[in-house]
Image (cartoon, rainbow, N blue to C red):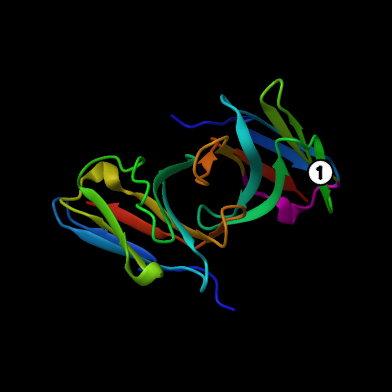
Amino acid sequence: GAGVSQSPSNKVTEKGKDVELRCDPISGHTALYWYRQSLGQGLEFLIYFQGNSAPDKSGLPSDRFSAERTGGSVSTLTIQRTQQEDSAVYLCASSPGGIEQFFGPGTRLTVL
Amino acid sequence: SQQGEEDPQALSIQEGENATMNCSYKTSINNLQWYRQNSGRGLVHLILIRSNEREKHSGRLRVTLDTSKKSSSLLITASRAADTASYFCATVFLGNTDKLIFGTGTRLQVFP
């Protein structure tokens, strides 16, 4: 079966523009996570969806960041008015039940 | 701030040698997981150890957990050049959601 997929794999944008990053989790996985990884750093938790519960947004760095998960499956992370410090790899993961997480290949975002 | 701190930050060894990486965390946990990352993209789950376990093995991997010291170690025995990657510990807080909090990572280089 297919793993977690993310698109685009690379995104270059200009400062001030909005971007949307997409994550397709593994079918049937109820939990979905977004992380951010700056160059040479560890992963920073952003947001967590579990079933129909309200998402845990505690890791979102500012109100420019938002995410939604439609129909309990695909998720979109939106960054409005991008800044250069938003440049990073954005990783999505899904899980069947909160134990092992399965990661996608990530989207490398570069803000010029 | 991130929950886990790892040391060393970087480790270089020869093939056949053992590699030991350490992880320390700050608060009580439900479980601790180790992940591997190649080339700064997707992560792969290696092993999970629960808070009531002290040691776990998987192939050439051995993980220990000392909850009194809030620390864990990952040992890779008989290392291979293909083990070259970054290794991260990640914790699930006791009583929290299932989101993972990642450490800073250890970059392992295995020379043939």
Image quadrant where residue B21 sits: top right
The residue at 79%/52% (across/down) is: B80
Q: Is residue B22 left or right of residue B5?
A: right
Q: Is residue B75 visible?
A: yes
Q: Residue furthest top?
A: B69
**Residue bearing the label numbered 1:** B56
Seen in the picture, residue A70 relative to B82 is either above or below; the reply is below
Q: Residues within 10 Å of mark 1 (few under 14, many from 20)?
A: some
Whether residue A39 appears in this view of the structure is: no
Looking at the image, residue A105 lies above or below residue B91: below
Instruction: Name which quarter of the figure residue B6 lies in.
Output: top right
- Residue at figure coordinates x 52%, y 66% from the top left: A29
For this rendering, which residue is in front, B71 or A95?
A95
The percent position of residue A40, horizontal first and vertical second, equals 48, 41
Question: SS for tag 1?
Answer: strand
* In the rendered image, the vertical position of residue B3 relative to residue A92, given as above or below: above
Q: Position of residue A111 (x, y in %)?
A: 24, 52
Residue shown at the point (56%, 24%) measured from the top left: B26
Residue in the picture at 63% in, 49% down:
B35
Q: Is residue B88 magenta?
A: no
Tag 1: residue type? Answer: Lys
In the image, A96: left or right of A57? right
Q: In the rendered image, which quarter contains the N terminus of chain B?
A: top left
Read off the magenta span.
B78-87
